[in-house]
Image (spheres, grey):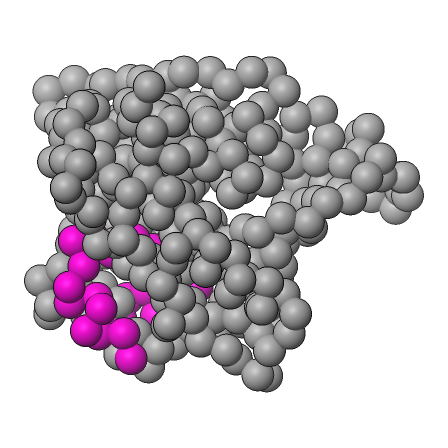
Amino acid sequence: MKFNADYSPKIVVVGSCSIDLVLNTSRMPQANQTILADRSQSFFGGKGANQAVATSRLGASVYFIGAIGADPHGQQICRNFREENINYGFLVEKPASSTGTAFVIASEGKNAITVVPAANNLLSPKDIDAAEKVISEADLVLTQLEIPLETIEYLYKKCEKLKVKIAIYAAPGQKLPQNIIDQSEFIIAKTCDLGAIFGPESREQIMKSLPNKLFVRDDTNSTIYFNGSEMSYYRNDPAQTAHKMGMGDAFTSGFAIAYCHKNQIKDCVKFGNDVSLKVAENRGSQSGLPFLKNVLV
């Protein structure tokens, strides 16, 4: 692994931010059933915000483009970005909406998550235009699928015009237009989402069509990809009691940082997995995100 201590990659994250409300229960409720929670907790989340915090802690100079509501949750997110040294000058307030929230039931190491996108659904191409100068100077743009696909497609066209590299964590899984697949520097996806994203072909067929571009993740913190000649696999299991919220965002962020520092793909995968393993040690998508010095030990 190589990291240039004098280089801070400029990463622009375009995506979602939210407050995660977590209920810890002894079992998952069934339909028409009422159960009591052991406790409730509140965390910062949203795939975009998670990646912004993660890449900032890993040494990047980070700009965030997203949307919040005119409410206390939105102000909490602004304060968190400020504390994490993230430039949030392009975090747009949408007065007609609330800030995004996610409701999580956590039980026996598993999570059932319902997301209310709210203001995240209002991020528009106009908001992308407002940040054109920042995007034009980026070493890498990162995005996900918790904002409108129309806005993501516009962002890709903007990056193509500006000759800026862009990558995507394709979650929650949905069909990706071919131009997004072709233009992406790399694509991170969950095994369970491959059919929704790419169609009915087998996992092996899909991966062989995207060598060193598609990296497929599962809940055991394993990553598989096709390196051009064979399937390559890397895995380091979290503990059985691991907290799995945000592991994909952590992997994406670690991979992106290693990629910006021009490491080999296999090393980018390993570093992404190592970052993901760290986040699994703490409840909440951002709580366990490591700083660079904690991963390189």
Quadrant of residue 14 within the rendered picture: bottom left
Q: How many marks?
A: 0
Percent of width and height locating residue 37: 85, 39
Residue nearer the viewer, 4 or 188: 4
Q: Position of residue 154 (x, y in %)?
A: 26, 71
- Residue at image x 26%, y 79%? 129
Q: Is residue 224 above or below residue 76?
A: above
* Front-most of residues 42 and 25: 42
Q: Quadrant of the C terminus?
A: top left
Q: Position of residue 254 (x, y in %)?
A: 32, 35
When the figure is inspected, residue 48 is found, relative to residue 269, above or below; the finding is: below
Q: Which residues are magenta?
A: 130-154
Above or below — where is 189 with respect to 175?
Answer: above
**Is residue 196 placed above or below 70 in the rendered structure?**
above
Quadrant location of residue 216?
A: top left
**Can you see residue 36?**
yes
Quarter of the image that includes the N terminus: top left
Residue at position x 46%, y 16% from top? 237
149 is within the stretch colored magenta: yes
Residue at horizontal 64%, vertical 74%?
71
- The residue depicted at 21 percent of the width and 66 percent of the height is 135
In reply to whether residue 189 is colored magenta, the answer given is: no
